[in-house]
Image (spheres, rainbow, N blue to C red):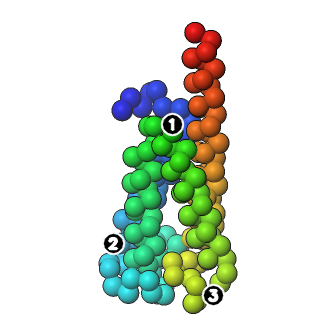
Amino acid sequence: MNFSRLRWPQVLALGTGGFLLLWGLAGFLVTGFADFAGHADTAVLGLRVNPLANLVHAVTGVAFMIVAPGVKRLGTAAVLLAGLYLVMFGIGAADDPATNVFNVNVPSNVLHLLTGFAGMTAVQGAVWMKQCDKLSASAS
């Protein structure tokens, strides 16, 4: 992959994916695999985690980094990522221990919201890239 040829939506996807992967791996160092969807005070830099949340963060981070170079795949994956993280934000915002299976607190919930917005931004960027590619292809 030629990093100098990546456009801003692809860089956003790589950065967001890398952050999510690191967050998930750091969470596993703190929680291990015990009490998979449990509620505990385990945290990474003030962000509460559990193994289920760590798995979601790590898997979506890797997936987002894998699809970043392809414009069509990036758009599809970014829609899914945005939807997932906005739903995770909603679950955390409900502030109900019965539904809060990701063990989120306010700081981690804010990051879920920002990750959802990053996904939405990447979707818009992927659409923009497709339109620019079509225009440049028709101009030549």
Q: Which mark is residue 96?
A: 3
Residue under numbered circle 2: 29
Q: Mark 3 or 1 closer to N-term?
A: 1
Residue at horizontal 52 percent and vertical 72 percent from the top:
47
Kindly indicate whether the residue at mark 1 contacts the one at mark 3 (C-beta within 8 angstroms): no
Indicate which label's residue lies in the foreground, 1 or 2: 1
Residue at horizontal 61 percent and vertical 77 percent from the top:
92
Secondary structure of residue under mark 2: helix
Indicate which label's residue lies in the foreground, 2 or 3: 3
Query: Residue 71: x, y in percent?
Result: 51, 36
Q: Residues within 10 Å of mark 3 (few under 14, many from 20)?
A: few
Q: For the residue marked with disc 3, what is the amino acid?
A: Asp
Outermost residue, top side = 140
Q: For the residue marked with disc 1, what is the amino acid?
A: Val
Outermost residue, front side = 138
Q: Is residue 140 above or below residue 67?
A: above
Residue under numbered circle 1: 71
Of the pair 4 and 83, the residue shown nearer to us: 83
Res 11 visible: no
In the rendered structure, the answer to whether residue 100 lies left or right of residue 50 reads: right
Q: Residues within 10 Å of mark 1 (few under 14, many from 20)?
A: many
Residue at horizontal 40 percent and vertical 62 percent from the top:
58
Q: Which mark is residue 124?
A: none
Q: Mark 1 or 2 closer to N-term?
A: 2
Of the pair 138 and 58, the residue shown nearer to us: 138
Label 3 to label 1: alpha-carbon separation: 38 Å
Query: Residue 103: x, y in percent?
Result: 52, 81
Query: Residue 116: x, y in percent?
Result: 61, 58
In the rendered structure, the answer to whether residue 139 lies left or right of residue 31 reads: right
Secondary structure of residue under mark 3: loop
Q: For the residue marked with disc 2, what is the amino acid?
A: Leu
